[in-house]
Amino acid sequence: MLRTCVACRERASREDLLRVVEHRGQLIADERAVHPGRGSWVHPTPQCLTLAMSRGSFARALRVSSKLDTVPLENRLKSLMDN
C-alpha cells in the first residue's frame, strides 16, 4: 500500500515511511502503525523531517492547530539513524 511523504510529497510503500502521530501535544513515531487516530507519513531522513517541520506539514496533516513538540520525534529519528 502506498503512502505520501508529507515533506517531499513522494509516494512510497509503508515500509519505507515512518508514521507520525500526535499524542498530548507531542509528535511521536508510530513505527508499528498501531496508535489510534490520524497519522502522517514521512521518510525517516533528516531532510524530510526538517522540511516537514519548516512547512508545518505535520500540523496540517494531523489537523492540529496548536504548536506541536517535535523533540520526541527528533530524538527517535536520531536513534534510528544511529542503528
Image (tube, helix red, strand yellow):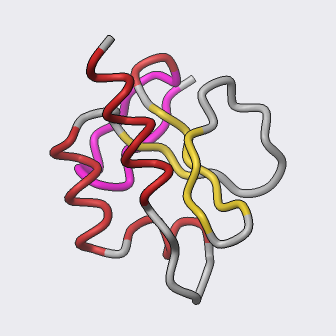
Q: Is residue 16 above or below residue 19?
A: above
Quadrant of residue 22 within the rendered picture: bottom right
Q: Position of residue 57 (x, y in %)?
A: 39, 68
What residue is rendered at 52% in x and 24% in y? 14
Which residue sits at x=36%, y=75%? Answer: 56
User: What span is colored magenta in the figure?
Assistant: 2-14
Query: In screen coordinates, is 74 left or right of 82?
Result: right
Counting the numbered discs, the total is 0
Instruction: Tell me where residue 35 sits by quadrant.
Output: top right
- The residue depicted at 46 percent of the width and 48 percent of the height is 73
- On whether residue 18 falls in the magenta region, the answer is no
Residue 45 to residue 21: above or below: above
Q: Relative to the observer, which residue lies in front, 81 or 10?
A: 81
Where 73 falls versus 15 (above or below)? Answer: below
Residue 8: x and y in percent read 23, 50
Nearest the eye: 27 or 62: 27
Given the current orientation, which residue lies at the most extreme bottom position?
A: 65
Query: Is 19 situated left or right of 9 in this image?
Result: right
Q: Where is residue 83 in the image (x, y as percent from the top left)?
A: 33, 11
Q: Which residue is drawn at 65% across and 72% down?
A: 25
- Quarter of the N terminus within the rendering: top right
Residue, far top: 83
Q: Tell which residue pokes out farthest to the left in this image.
A: 47
Instruction: Confirm whether the magenta stretch covers residue 5.
Output: yes
Up the image or down, 76 lies above or below 53; here it is above
Q: In this view, does 72 lie to the left or right of 56?
A: right
